[in-house]
Amino acid sequence: MSFFQRISFTALNLPTSASGMPIFIFVLPFYADDLGLGLSLVGIVFFLGRLTDIVTDPVMGVLIDRYPSKWGKHKHWIFLSTPIFMLATYLIFLPPIESPTAFYFFCGLFFLYAAFTLSSISQLSWASYLAPNYDDRTKLLTLRELMSLVGMFAVILIPALVEIYDPSLEAKIRAIGIFVLICIPLITLNAVVQVPDTSASKVLKKTSTPFKAFKDLFSNKMLTKIVLAAVLIAFCMSLNGALYLIWMEVVIELPEYSSRLMLVYYIVSVLGLWAWRFLSIKTSKHFSAGVACLYAISVLILGFIGFWFIQDLQENYKLIAVGTFITLYGIAFSGPLPLINAIVADISDKLNFDQGENISGTVFSFLTTMTKIGFALAALIPYMVLEMLMGFEISLGTENSYFSKMGIFYIYTFVPIISYSIAAYLLFSHSLSREEHAEIKHNLVN
């Protein structure tokens, strides 16, 4: 592929991240507080929205493998996601009614995640075809992650600019929605036109029913171990995102700096992306991803210790300390998941060699289905624990009890530490090497 084709393909992930990341950081608090649904109800609705999405993923993976079109195996599915994606963005980010109900929010999330399913699984399966080699695959999928970060930069920069003129959460969310609505059709059309796809005649159609295919994949220890690591990492990242605004307001007590510090977080994550990419090429994907998890644990421990020294400092000193923590933590953000996507693509090649059938769509739908469980639980569990067990009320802000404030702090810190620790162990124990994958690809070609 040419450089422009690589950019065109990986840019497909930009609107997905630009609409997906604000769900945790802006949209959930907005619907919980400003629109009056409450933390627990929003957490439950979000979980149910992701739960329905989890059911559609297995079906989508098998459809990709079984039903190509004259354009190839992937393009038509991404094209079909566009109108659904635009409708969902409008409903969630620019609600046409003043007091959306929980059912309204659920419908918006359902359409949004259905569009994500159509597009994301197709993209990951497509990447296996576009970058067949071990390190080329890492480069392509880390470039895809870079495009994801560009989308995140945009939706962090937009609120940072908007809050100069209108600090309301509603204004920030509407501006993000307009940006995403413009990006979706332009980026999709360019990719469909510019990027090559598989030949339809080469796509196998022996794939079993979706849930039978999933049952078979659960028995593959190598795959399930890596997928479990992805679930744990997704849970960590999403939990921190879901609690970030609340953490900044109630625990750190610097809410006016939240958007700007978040922008710093995503800027330094680009440096982290290239650092983990470089390490993976010099060593291996699973080693680099495991080291990224250990690094995140170290920063969280450092942040926990440092909090007790900075909590009573003057605002300027506290801002420097918190900014340093967020900068260091941001380096870990973009490390593990794109490398795990590349690892799963390698395992998909091994399954292709072992079984004589290319089921990359099914394999990636297995990954995304299980990962979405981590994303879904990341909002449901902390929100319900805080509101039901610790008496936290989002409308009270800093007026909440010390007990509930510390509950946020401990959840924000120690749940990710535990999850990252298990994920690191699973990644370090992965056994498919660069040399073994090269032999598998050689045998598949011949």
Image (cartoon, rainbow, N blue to C red):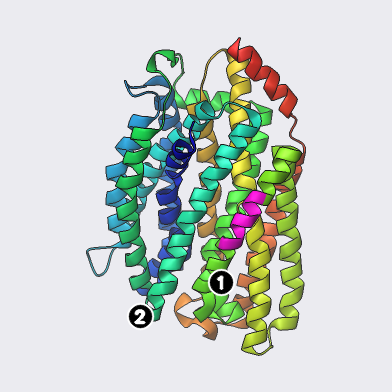
What residue is drawn where x is 30% and y is 36%? 80
| Cβ–Cβ under 8 Å for marks 1 and 2 | no
For the residues labelled 1 and 2, the Cα–Cα distance comes to 18 Å
Please state which of residues 42 and 15 is positioned toward the viewer in this rendering: 15
On screen, residue 232 versus residue 424, left or right, reads left
Residue 215 against residue 239 in the figure, above or below: above
Q: Which residue is mark 2?
A: 165
Q: Specify the principal SS of the magenta part.
A: helix
Region rendered in magenta: 267-274
Q: Which residue is mark 1?
A: 261
Residue 285: x percent and y percent? 69, 38
On screen, residue 309 versus residue 244, left or right, reads right
Residue 444: x percent and y percent? 60, 14
Residue 309 against residue 141 in the figure, above or below: below
Residue 273: x percent and y percent? 62, 51
SS at circle 2: helix
Residue 26: x percent and y percent? 43, 66
